[in-house]
Image (cartoon, rainbow, N blue to C red):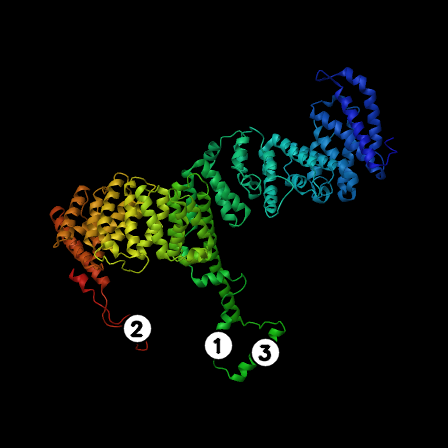
Amino acid sequence: MTGKETQEAAVGALFAAIGSHVAVIIEGLRDNGEESADGYEQCKGALKQFSEAAAKGLALPERSAVVRHGWAADAIGEPLWKAANNGLRATWATELIHPLLKALVATAEKATASPLIAGSSGTLEAHVGFALALRSASDSSVVDVEKLVSLVTGTEKSLVLWDKVYHKCTGLRECMWLLRAVQMLFARGCDDARLAKVLIWVLCKLPDPSLTVSQAGLSAVEWMSTISAQRLWAMMAPVVLEEMTASVDRDSVPYKWTRILRAVVPRNCGSVDLLEAMALAANHPAALREHSQGSFWISLVQQAGIDPGELCHGRLSELKQTIRQTMVDNTTSSAMFTAAMSLVKDLVFVCGDYLALQLLEFAREDIDPTKLAAISAEDIEVWQTPAGQLHFDPVSSKEPERNSGKKKDDLWAEQLEREIALKKGQARKLTKEEQALVERQHAKENEIRARVDSSHKGLHRGLALIRAVAQSNSVASACMLTSVRIVVDQAIIGGKSVSERLAGAEIYSTMLALSRVADGLEAGLRVPIAVGILRARGFAGVVPEDWTRESMEDLATRVYFRLRVSCEAQALPAAGFNFLLPLMKVTAEAGGWGRKAKRGVEEHDEYAVMDHAAEQLTMTVDILGFHAHFGQSEDMPRREMIELLVKLMAEQAMLLPACRANLVRLAEAMEDTDGPAERDALIAGLTRADSAVRNACLAALDFADLTELDHSAELWLNVGGTGAVALEENAELARTLWADNGMEISPELIADIVPFLNHQASEIRSCAARSIALAAKDAEEEQGGLVGSALGLLQDAYTRWYISLEPEYDRFGLVIPGTQHRVDIAEARVA
């Protein structure tokens, strides 16, 4: 009957029925779960009849391929595969079943010799033979495992692993046996990367996929993961990541990456190495668009029965290195870079600000203000010119010089020749000298391109990392100070217009990301503050046009009024204040925005005549005062607050009393918690020209710890104040601080004071001169004198500062600009 039937559907049904009966017979060999000799004797006749018929069926000619496939896959393959899955030992099969396996293996070996010629007729039988033989390989009399594995993997045109062969396996039965062959190869230690390609073909690339095939593919991956999930992922990772990246741009795909990745991770496997290796894949955009809630990677970690905190802290160094390497190896627009940034969010969410601050150091390294400042506008134009093309043609620039001595007729003839050659598509042949010029220019422009491209990539990497930390929604507020310093100080202030041209709207996006986590600020003030910072620093080009219509005068006044009222009622948390500080700094630098205009008739009233600029500065000082008592917190920008108050005192006389009170209150709050940065900021204020500013800094230093300093030139400088009451008061405060902190006079102290003799403020020059004399006098009484050393230092300094008042002339006898009308530094010598 099986030999006469030609209808494929009928043949399939017939052999499926035969396979089911054989499976029942094999199962009947059991007796209470064990193999039974009596059961074998009862079924021996039926099994023998089946074996003989099957052997004849496998030997049918090529034209009976449908029948042979039925015997191989349905009648023989399915029952034996089920028997192996059920744990039945085939001790009874030596006589009846092993000959069939040998026949299938022989067919597979024959088909392997010419896989494309074998086509559909031999491929299915070969896959059945490989799968069953490797599954039954415990009996060496059936098959040589090493030989069989080598037969499959030892050639590029493998019957199992060659894409031109398995791409023809599109039906359910073909895919099932292809997967089983792959499973058995993996179980026998094969790690060929082509196995992963076969799995991805079945899971993702079938022309007409079915749910049954997809389920079979996932089941195959799950089964292989139980053998060695880590080895499986090491084999699959490159192929999976490549296909995931390719699928990002597709509108939809008929499969789920999340299901594939979950199949790789056995439940409660506890494999930390596996989950570390899968961190990027689980954060890939292709997977995340299928998993909208929570972190998919963390869900995989929990599926493996691992504590996310223990994994992240235990493998922190390796995960950081993975992130860093991925950032360097990929552009910011690539899917892998996006995956790394998503991993940053997961790690910061789990580990908190401890890790966030470490990751932000990568951004600090990438955004180098020194390199950005060294880039010129011409360098950017060279960088924008395509590689292989010259931005500046050295040959064309030489032509006017070369043609200067030629006659008009000769020039006309050369121009005509060039135009004719151009029409014919022929370039003029360059001379050796011209060729050398072109090569040197190429080398120069390539070096410029590399330098600008490095800064461009670093700037984009750093900004993307800061956005990722800010979007972690966990501890971004604790890292606000570091983030703002990197973005504002390094990218905006350090990079200036270069950052605007290289990063563009990404700077605006980064400031917006920071504004969203600026805790305490009203929602309606966050974007205006970010816009105000960018516009005030000259980055209006990256701000949307709608936000540039309001003048800076109105924008700043509106923002400060609302902040002044809200902060008086309740001070801002550290995150909100850190985000606001750059706006206050640029306000102080600009002196506020707006023209002075009188309001009303009550001119004697201070606020009636105050212009917007003065109002902005006054409210800035008030806001600083509302937060001075938070000085004990290291999350606050204490150094910047000190520098801002000192600057406002020095440049805005009307604000001096309020700034002094705020500075002293801030220093008092910092007592016992201040560090070198805050101390140095206060000491730097001791060289301001205004004695009142210096007095405020001296009063604030009373709360600072200066015992680590052997000496301080700026502090001893104020000891030299005399004459005016304010100067003498400063001198007394300075001497008290000097003595209380155990500082000593030394030659190094005098050497540090000497440069102040050339200070632009006469009061500082006078204090420097008297402080040197006092140091020499005190040292003479205590140590035997430093007069000789001091005189030598003074002589060297005046020698360096000496200039001739006579103008300088060039070789033509003309005065060199800038050398005339020189002024003697007599004031320094008088001091």
Tell me whether the residue at label 1 lies in contact with that at label 2, contact meaning CB atoms closer than 8 angstroms. no
Give the Cα separation between the discs numbered 3 and 1.
Answer: 17 Å
> Going 49% across and 30% down the picture, which residue do you hit?
307
- The answer to whether residue 46 is seen in the rendering is yes
Q: Amino acid at mark 1?
A: Pro
Report which residue position mark 3 lands on: 417
Report which residue position mark 2 lands on: 816
- 568 vs 87, nearest the viewer: 568
In the visual, does 366 lie left or right of 72? left
Give the Cα separation between the discs numbered 1 and 2.
Answer: 29 Å
Q: Amino acid at mark 2?
A: Ile
Crowdedness near tag 3: few (<14), some (14–19) or many (≥20) residues, C-alpha within 10 Å:
few
Crowdedness near tag 1: few (<14), some (14–19) or many (≥20) residues, C-alpha within 10 Å:
few
Rendering coords of residue 426 (x, y %): 61, 72
- 313 vs 612, nearest the viewer: 612
Label of residue 363 in the image: none
Q: Secondary structure at mark 3?
A: helix
N-terminal of the two: label 3 or label 2?
A: 3
Rendering coords of residue 757 (x, y %): 20, 58
Rendering coords of residue 490 (x, y %): 39, 52
Is residue 13 shown above or below 719? above
> Going 55% across and 43% down the picture, which residue do you hit?
285
N-terminal of the two: label 1 or label 2?
A: 1
Report which residue position mark 1 lands on: 400
Residue found at the far front of this picture: 601
Residue 70: image quadrant is top right
Which quarter of the image is occupied by the N terminus? top right
